[in-house]
Image (cartoon, helix red, strand yellow):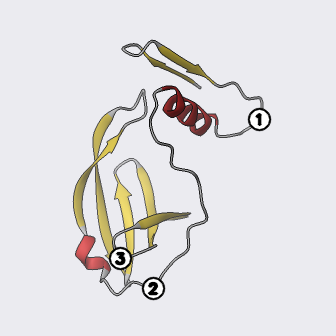
Amino acid sequence: MHIRYIDDDITVIVLSNTESHAEFIADGLSAIALNKSIVLPYLHKEKISTTTPGKYTGKYMMQLTRPPYMADFPVAFAERNGRLFIHSDFTPEIMVKPESEKKFFLLMALISK
């Protein structure tokens, strides 16, 4: 993984000979070098939500902030059988689970159509 921040004169390179997630390591190192906050990983726990998933259905523009994919792209949230799913034209649907009333996390089990 190679990330270069020209304006800040910072280059981050992470090499791996395994199938590790080098991009996440590079993101963390970039954040440290740029004096930005780091969101540490933690175990997400599903909570029972009193909010209906339908409240969040609709189309949104999602911002990608990691180079080289710094762009906005459309995603849609849809309700199916009382569950919330995220969908884009580029990936299969992924179930989104509630962690609080306003915070959700992705369940990385892909749902085929």
- Residue beneath label 3, please? 101
Q: Amino acid at mark 3?
A: Glu
Q: Is residue 66 left or right of residue 12?
A: left
**Residue at the front extreme of this rendering:** 35
| Residue contact between numbered discs 1 and 2, judged by CB atoms under 8 Å | no
Residue located 39% across and 47% down the image: 90
**Residue toward you, 40 or 22:** 40
Residue located 60% across and 60% down the image: 42
Q: Secondary structure at mark 1?
A: loop
**Residue toward you, 12 or 37:** 37
Relative to residue 60, is residue 28 depicted above or below? above
Upstream in sequence: badge 1 or badge 2: 1
**Residue at the right extreme of this rendering:** 17
Upstream in sequence: badge 1 or badge 3: 1
Q: Nearer the viewer, mark 1 or mark 2?
A: 2
Residue located 27% across and 40% down the image: 72
Q: Amino acid at mark 1?
A: Thr
**Residue 73 is drawn in which quadrant?**
top left
Spatial CA distance of label 1 from label 2 is: 38 Å
Q: Give how far across and how far down residue 6 sits, in percent.
A: 40, 13
Q: Secondary structure at mark 3?
A: loop
Q: Nearer the viewer, mark 1 or mark 3?
A: 3
Q: Give how far across and how far down residue 15 sits, in percent.
A: 69, 24
- Residue beneath label 2, please? 48
- Residue beneath label 1, please? 18
